[in-house]
């Protein structure tokens, strides 16, 4: 009897866990579809951005029950940038260590815009 109850419990956990994961996938699909439908323009340009702030967060190794997980949370080197009154962020160790607050850096900016030319999302890339 106890085995039947334990098996039923784990079966319920697996079913509800699977349903939750399916729900998350459907939600992500719908969000991506909505985002793509909003994007009307894509602009790509090389710009000089001003560094307005820098933040460092040290990575950690997660431990559960004394065992070390093979994955770690990486260190993040967040640089806040400003260009034409808009704020942007990039996570890059080389930029973090090479530039100071107030300096300008040249980056490739790709902006996805809506019909009113408002920024929906952006990507920043270092120039080679």
Image (cartoon, rainbow, N blue to C red):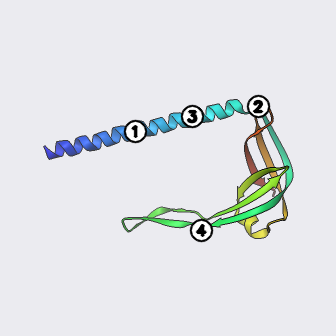
Q: Disc 2 marks which residue? A: 40
Image location (x, y in percent) of residue 87: 77, 52
Label 3 vs 2, first from the N-terminus: 3
* Secondary-structure class at tag 2: loop
Q: CA distance from mark 3 to mark 4?
A: 32 Å
Q: Which mark is residue 58?
A: 4
Name the residue: 62% across, 35% down. Answer: 32
- Disc 1 element: helix
Counting residues from the start of the chain, the first of labels 3 and 4 encountered is: 3
* Picture quadrant of residue 35: top right
Residue 18: mark: 1
Name which of mark 4 and mark 1 comes first in the sequence: 1
Q: Secondary structure at mark 4?
A: loop
Q: Residue drawn at (44%, 63%), measured in percent from left and top? A: 69
Q: Could you give the CA–CA distance between mark 1 and mark 3, rounded to whole angstroms?
A: 17 Å
> Mark 3 = which residue?
29
Label 1 with label 3: CB-CB less than 8 Å: no
The CA distance from mark 2 to mark 1 is 35 Å
Label 3 and label 2: CA atoms lie apart by 19 Å
Q: Position of residue 92 (x, y in %)?
A: 71, 61
Location of the C terminus (image quadrant): bottom right
């Amino acid at each position: 009897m106890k085995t039947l109850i334990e098996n039923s419990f784990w079966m319920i956990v697996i079913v509800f866990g699977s349903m939750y994961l399916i729900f998350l996938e459907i939600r992500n699909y719908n969000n991506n579809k909505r985002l793509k439908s909003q994007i009307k323009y894509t602009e790509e340009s090389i710009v000089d951005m001003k560094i307005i702030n820098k933040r460092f967060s040290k990575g950690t190794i997660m431990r559960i029950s004394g065992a070390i997980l093979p994955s770690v949370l990486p260190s993040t080197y967040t640089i806040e940038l400003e260009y034409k009154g808009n704020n942007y962020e990039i996570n890059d160790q080389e930029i973090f260590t090479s530039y100071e607050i107030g300096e300008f850096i040249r980056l490739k900016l790709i902006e996805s815009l809506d019909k009113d030319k408002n920024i929906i999302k952006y990507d920043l890339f270092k120039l080679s």
